[in-house]
Each structure stands twice: as structure tokens, then as C-alpha cells.
Image (tube, rainbow, N blue to C red):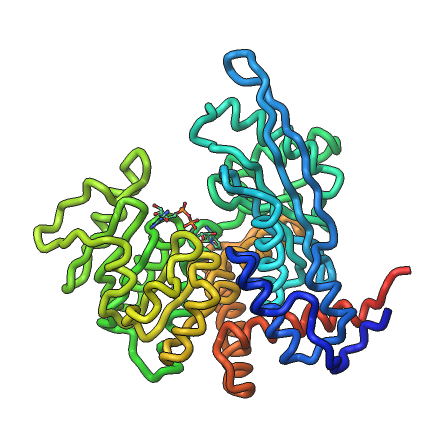
């Protein structure tokens, strides 16, 4: 099979249209991928390699429940590509986790790492489970058994997990400990997003939100706009949304006028009191905005109203498929910075581009998390740990470099930023595959 980068006249097996029709995040990612393949005139061999994950593992994970009964959950680990380095990607616990979702997220990780030019490929894992239905002890048993079952394909030079939806530092501590017990020696480099006491990195928790803030400021600079006083709306007030909102307001002088979560949104045209709102959310048992009523001038609005507010910057930082063909024509922000993975559907993306709205795509905008995960891995391998100022400085350097490369590519090719990010990422992955050649 030839994997030479050459123009091929025939259509790819999965066209943009077919992929999009499959819907969901996998459909969107495959659609964008097909467009990038065509623009790069990639050979059919390279397309076929990049389109499919290298390795997929499905495991049955039995655990003893607290009441003595046995429950069996389905877990997954997908390694999309190791062409540029060890596979890297989070583990999520959610009832909707299935092979298609994990595949899509693994591919996005390959592309995200390539956009940031990190020496990693992409992976993702997950268990189809409602974690809120399990006790802490049951979650620990689930994590340890899952870790033991995917252990044969993990490794600091093979595949390095991290937390994702409904998993945490504690999950990574259990995973790392399980692998250390199986291997008989310490293995901090097996995972990132660990507690600092176990070899985690300073600045990891804030990293994705800080990266989103940096991407926002870089976009504003390119548009010759000063951040001071610009109106920002943030959907999702969890890890990413909270840090992005607070950093934009406190360090860059933006006016965050609205934030929302799964319970609705709050709005104040003069700017929200983020300190008290953040404190309220961090102290609430479910970490929700609901019940926050401190500021008298506050309006309660819906998520749809938040997404279509008259603001300068909109940051979707909650879940996927929030800006769709149904609301894209009503979005009034001039800049959208995707904190979440896949918040904009393929169709909505086209509509926003036609309207000249700048969308900073997820694989660039929320790369701060994996960038500091990379720093964590480097620190673990060297057993030498950095101060937070060093982490922030290096994060800024890598984010700004990636942003500049995507922006320049967009200008050179006359395309939107998502297309440019995909072009850059696919080109880097294809180049690595080509230079390595095929084994045997
Ligand atoms: P989180 O669980 O800490 O917070 C999620 C927030 O979204 C919460 O405020 C929740 O109430 C809100 N939310 C959930 N469903 C909603 C809905 N239907 N409408 C409005 N709001 C809703 O999660 P997070 O870590 O902040 O991640 C948010 C997004 O960013 C996810 O898409 C995640 O994959 C992505 N992301 C996170 C990181 C990271 O380091 N945490 C890195 C890259 C990408």
C-alpha cells in the first residue's frame, strides 16, 4: 500500500456528507477530517490509516457492590494513533459512553495533541456507568478493576490516561496505584491529572480554563480589540468555565455578563460578581449555580438565551452539541471560543462561518489541559517538579504558538480556524506516519 502524500481523484469512502449524517461528535469529527483530507490531497492509504483507531479494547468490569451483589459494567479504551508519540487521553464515566463516542474522542485527542505540537498521539477511555449511583468504595473497586483490565495496553511510553467527565484526581490516584501494584514499582508517568502529592503538576486544575482565556485574548488581539470591558458569556460553570471566566475577568479586565450551567443561567449587563458566584458553586453540594441570588440586579435566563446574548465573546464550556442549526443564526457573539469538546455541530459551524463569526475550535481552544498534562508527564519522567509560574509561562508559550500557527494557516489558505486547525493537525499526523513508514 502506498502512503505517499499524493493527489487521488476518487472520493474518500466516508465523505463529509455521509459522516455528518451519522450525527454526533463522531460524525462532526469525521466530516471535518474528510474536508482536511481533500484539502491536503492526502493519499487513500494515509486517509485509511488516520480514519481508523489503531487499537480498540472493550472490557467487562465486574465489581462487588456494597450489598454483596455483583454488577458488570462495560469499559473501553481506544488508541487512535501513536504515530507522533505515546497515546494520550482521558477516561470518562457516564451512562452514554459507547464505542463510537470513545472513538471520536480518541481521534480528537490525536488532533489536539498535533495542533499543540505535543509528542503524543491520541486515546480515550470510559465506562458506561452512572457514577452517582455508586458509593465511593464501589467507584474505587470499579476503577481498580477497569485499570487492571486495560493495563496490558497502558504505559508511560504507550498510553497515558487522564481524568475526564466524572473522573477526578482521586480516580487517577487509584488507577496509578493499581498499575504500581501490578508492576511492582512506582509509575507516576502512567497517568496525568494526579494529586500533586503523587506526582501531579502545579497548575493542572486551572490549565484548560487558562488556555481558553489565552485563546480568547489572542483572538481579540488579532481583531485589534482590547479585552478590557468586553462582554463575555460562558456556558458551563465547572472546571473549564469557572477558570476561564475568572481569569478573563481578573487578569484581562473582561466583563463576564452571563454564566450558566445545567440548572440555567444568570445575567447582569454590568458584569457578574464572579467571586461570590464561584464561592456559591464551590460550596453547593452539586456544584451548581442554582440558588445563587446574591446580586439584586441579577436576571435568571435560560441556556438558549445565554447562547444568543448580545456579547462580544461566547465560551461554550459545558457539553457537546449546544450550538446547532436551530440557534446558530441567532448567535450574536462575534467570537466563539470552544471550551467544551464538540459544542458546535457541523451544520452550525457552516452557518457561523457564513456569518463571519470567528470560532476558535475545541482542538485548539481547550488544549491547555493536555498541554499541562504533557508538562506533568515530563516532570514525572525527570522526577523534577516546576513552580506554578513556570507552568503558566510554558503553557502561555505553547498555547500562543499553536494559536499563531492555526491563525496563519487560516489566513494562508483562506479558511476558518477549525479547518485550519484540522489541516495543521492532519498534516502533522500524516507526516509522522509517512516518515515512520509501515511495519513490517
Ligand atoms: P465539569 O463537569 O466540571 O463542568 C461542566 C459544567 O457544564 C457544569 O457547570 C454543568 O452544570 C454544566 N452543564 C452540564 N450539562 C449542561 C447543559 N445541558 N447545559 C448547560 N450546562 C450544562 O466539566 P469540565 O471539566 O469543566 O468540562 C467541560 C467541557 O470541557 C467538557 O466538554 C469537557 O470534555 C471539556 N474539556 C475539559 C477539560 C478539562 O481539563 N476539564 C479539558 C478539555 C476539554
Q: Quadrant of the C terminus?
A: bottom right
Q: Residue at x 43, y 30 (%)?
A: 132
- Residue closest to the eye, 38 or 241: 38
Q: From the viewer's perspective, is 432 left or right of 397?
A: right
Q: Is residue 386 above or below residue 197?
A: below
Residue at figure coordinates x 55%, y 78% from the top left: 405
Residue found farthest to the right: 440
- What quarter of the picture does the N terminus occupy? bottom right
Residue 248 image offset from top left, x and y in percent: 32, 64
Residue 227 seen in the current view:
yes
**87 w.r.t. 4: above or below:** above
The answer to which image quadrant residue 72 occupies is: top right
Residue drawn at (24%, 52%) of the image = 265
Q: Residue 422 occupies which quadrant of the picture? A: bottom right
Q: Is residue 235 left or right of residue 58?
A: left
Tally of marks: 0
Camera-side residue: 379 or 307? 307
Q: Can residue 186 be seen at all in this image of the molecule?
A: no
x and y, in percent, of residue 244 in the image: 36, 59
Residue 256 location, x and y as percent? 25, 62
User: Residue shown at 54%/75% (left/top)?
Assistant: 419
- Please, which residue is most extreme toward the left here? 296
Tell which of 404 and 145 is nearer to you. 145
Amino acid at each position: 500500500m502506498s502512503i505517499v502524500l499524493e493527489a487521488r481523484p476518487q472520493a474518500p469512502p466516508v465523505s463529509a456528507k455521509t459522516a455528518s449524517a451519522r450525527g454526533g461528535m463522531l460524525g462532526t469529527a469525521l466530516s471535518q477530517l474528510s474536508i482536511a483530507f481533500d484539502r491536503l490531497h492526502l493519499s487513500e492509504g494515509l486517509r485509511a490509516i488516520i480514519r481508523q483507531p489503531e487499537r480498540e479494547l472493550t472490557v467487562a468490569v465486574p465489581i462487588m457492590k456494597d450489598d454483596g451483589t455483583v454488577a458488570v459494567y462495560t469499559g473501553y479504551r481506544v488508541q487512535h494513533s501513536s504515530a507522533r508519540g505515546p497515546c494520550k487521553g482521558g477516561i470518562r464515566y457516564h451512562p452514554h459512553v459507547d464505542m463510537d463516542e470513545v472513538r471520536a474522542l480518541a481521534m480528537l485527542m490525536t488532533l489536539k495533541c498535533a495542533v499543540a505540537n505535543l509528542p503524543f498521539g491520541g486515546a480515550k477511555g470510559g465506562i458506561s456507568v452512572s457514577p452517582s449511583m455508586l458509593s465511593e468504595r464501589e467507584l474505587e473497586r470499579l476503577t481498580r478493576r477497569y485499570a487492571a483490565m486495560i493495563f496490558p495496553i497502558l504505559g508511560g511510553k504507550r498510553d497515558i490516561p487522564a481524568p475526564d467527565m466524572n473522573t477526578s484526581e482521586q480516580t487517577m490516584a487509584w488507577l496509578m496505584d493499581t498499575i504500581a501494584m501490578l508492576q511492582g514499582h512506582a509509575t507516576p508517568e502512567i497517568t496525568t491529572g494526579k494529586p500533586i502529592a503523587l506526582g501531579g503538576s502545579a497548575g493542572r486544575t486551572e490549565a484548560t480554563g487558562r488556555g481558553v482565556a489565552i485563546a480568547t485574548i489572542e483572538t481579540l488581539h488579532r481583531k485589534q480589540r482590547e479585552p478590557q470591558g468586553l462582554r463575555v458569556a460562558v456556558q458551563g460553570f465547572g472546571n473549564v468555565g469557572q477558570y476561564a471566566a475568572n481569569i478573563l475577568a481578573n487578569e484581562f479586565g473582561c466583563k463576564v455578563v452571563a454564566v450558566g450551567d445545567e440548572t440555567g443561567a444568570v445575567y447582569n449587563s454590568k458584569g457578574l460578581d464572579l467571586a461570590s458566584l464561584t464561592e456559591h458553586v464551590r460550596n453547593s453540594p452539586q456544584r451548581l449555580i442554582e440558588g445563587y441570588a446574591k446580586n439584586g440586579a441579577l436576571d435568571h435566563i435560560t441556556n438558549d438565551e445565554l447562547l444568543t446574548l448580545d456579547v462580544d465573546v461566547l465560551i461554550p464550556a459545558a457539553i457537546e452539541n449546544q450550538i446547532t442549526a436551530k440557534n446558530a443564526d441567532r448567535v450574536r457573539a462575534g467570537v466563539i471560543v470552544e471550551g467544551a469538546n464538540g459544542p458546535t455541530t457541523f451544520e452550525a459551524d457552516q452557518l457561523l462561518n457564513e456569518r463571519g463569526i470567528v470560532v476558535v475550535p475545541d482542538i485548539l481552544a481547550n488544549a491547555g489541559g493536555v498541554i499541562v498534562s504533557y508538562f506533568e508527564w515530563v516532570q514525572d519522567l525527570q522526577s523534577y517538579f516546576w513552580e506554578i509560574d513556570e507552568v503558566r509561562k510554558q503553557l502561555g508559550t505553547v498555547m500562543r504558538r499553536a494559536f499563531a500557527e492555526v491563525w496563519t494557516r487560516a489566513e494562508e489558505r483562506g479558511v476558518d480556524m477549525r479547518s485550519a486547525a484540522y489541516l495543521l493537525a492532519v498534516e502533522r499526523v500524516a507526516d509522522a506516519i509517512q516518515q515512520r513508514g509501515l511495519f513490517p
